[in-house]
Amino acid sequence: MKRFLFSLVCALHLTSHVAAQDLTALARVDPAASRIEDGWWGRTEIVLALSQGVPFRVFTLDAPARLVVDFREVDFSTARAADLLGEEGSRISGLRFGAFQPGWSRLVADMAEPMLPQQIGMPVDPNSGRATLEISLKTVGAEEFAEQSGAPEDPNWTPAFLKAPAPKRKADDRFTVVLDPGHGGIDPGAEREDTTEKQLMLGFARTLADALRRSGVDVVLTRDDDYFVALETRVAIAHQVEGDLFISLHADVLSQGGAKGATVYTLSDAASDAATEHLAARHDRSDIIAGADLTGSDDQVAQVLLDLARQETEPRSRALAKMLAQGMAKAGGPMNRKPLREAGFSVLKSADIPSVLIEIGFLSSKRDLANISDPIWRKGMAEGIAQAVLDWRDEDAARAALVRQ
């Protein structure tokens, strides 16, 4: 039986002065007063100084070992993971924090060895209202850690955004495209200087959605703001809105082979090359980065989905990818030297919806970064993709009519 650790600041050290505050308001991190330190006998202390107390909860996840802290809600904009982490070789080997869902923030700490919280508290200063999250961790055996880890099932904390929406289709059953801006929230995706993949792709998805809607196409975005969406949920959204096709949008950093230029990927259990395999592995780490519980995943089910996708949608997805590459090239590209590739991206594993993943460029390329940052270039590329989608829709409908005959 999995056990979870749960704490609410409103139950801890609150005087009437502090209790009168709005504990759902945004708290700010004070990096100078925050720290992560290893101590003796397998103990590690996490101290996070906040401008005020907020409700929070703490739990651990296995495979890989992680500590997760959810807040309602904390502004981490002034904090840097490198400033909080201890020296190299610390028992906390990595740290990420940021927006998780609207109204939610999350901190995820990677553990070099399994540790469980022994003490958790958030004392609040009765005069200033400032609060300090204090977590004391102790090294435990792998079996004990696995037994006591897992995401808590608490309806008071589970946001509706973790579930895919189920909007009704319009009566005329118009063609629906699901656009999937990569990453989001606590998972920034690729980063280059002050630019993040998550923000660029959300902006590009909105531009592409406008171009498609002007052509009479219905468009659904898997996220319409800066929050995290699990890979499984992205696919579920496409199914629940009965999407006619699914396009995931990315702009990664990839040093292997000097990657540059737009590339379109379709599903395969084997990557078409080493760089693509590395890229797929990076993309599929999104859920781990954001602190998702993967213990319920079923590789056998995933393989069935993969097989179904091959049988039912692979030819249509390949035709879509080819048309998209042509349309993007006509819009001026620039395209990758090998614009059509294959890999086992999780977001492409829908069994019945043609799906592609587009890297509209790579942030590791100065040329691509300049293009993606240019609104005029983005508009032209979006128009090229939109026209390719319309061309594919018409050809796909014509092929379906011939099959029925």
Image: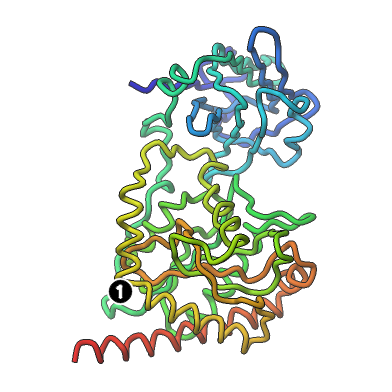
Q: Residue at the far top: name it.
A: 41
Tell me which colouring the rendered structure shows: rainbow
Q: Is residue 2 above or below residue 27?
A: above
State the residue in front, 278 or 357: 278
Residue displayed at 53% across by 29% down: 65
State the residue in front, 405 or 212: 405
Residue 129 visible in the current orientation: no
Left or right placement of residue 343 versus residue 394 in this view: right
Residue under circle 1? 170
Left or right placement of residue 255 versus residue 267 in this view: right
Quarter of the image where one finds residue 132: top right
Amino acid carrying mark 1 in the image: Lys
Quarter of the image where one finds residue 47: top right
State the residue in front, 170 or 142: 142
Residue displayed at 69% across by 59% down: 253
Q: Secondary structure at mark 1?
A: loop
Residue displayed at 52% across by 60% down: 224
**Picture coordinates of residue 218, whole percent (x, y):** 41, 75
**Picture coordinates of residue 24, whole percent (x, y):** 55, 33
Q: Is residue 192 above or below residue 4?
A: below
**Picture coordinates of residue 265, whole percent (x, y):** 52, 69
**Picture coordinates of residue 111, whole percent (x, y):** 60, 27
Name the quarter where the C terminus is drawn: bottom left
Name the quarter where the N terminus is drawn: top left
Q: How many marks?
A: 1
Residue 373 visible in the current orientation: yes
Left or right placement of residue 139 versus residue 127 in this view: left
Residue displayed at 43% across by 42% down: 159
Q: Residues within 10 Å of mark 1 (few under 14, many from 20)?
A: few
Q: Residue at the far left: name it.
A: 405
Q: Is residue 176 above or below residue 60?
A: below
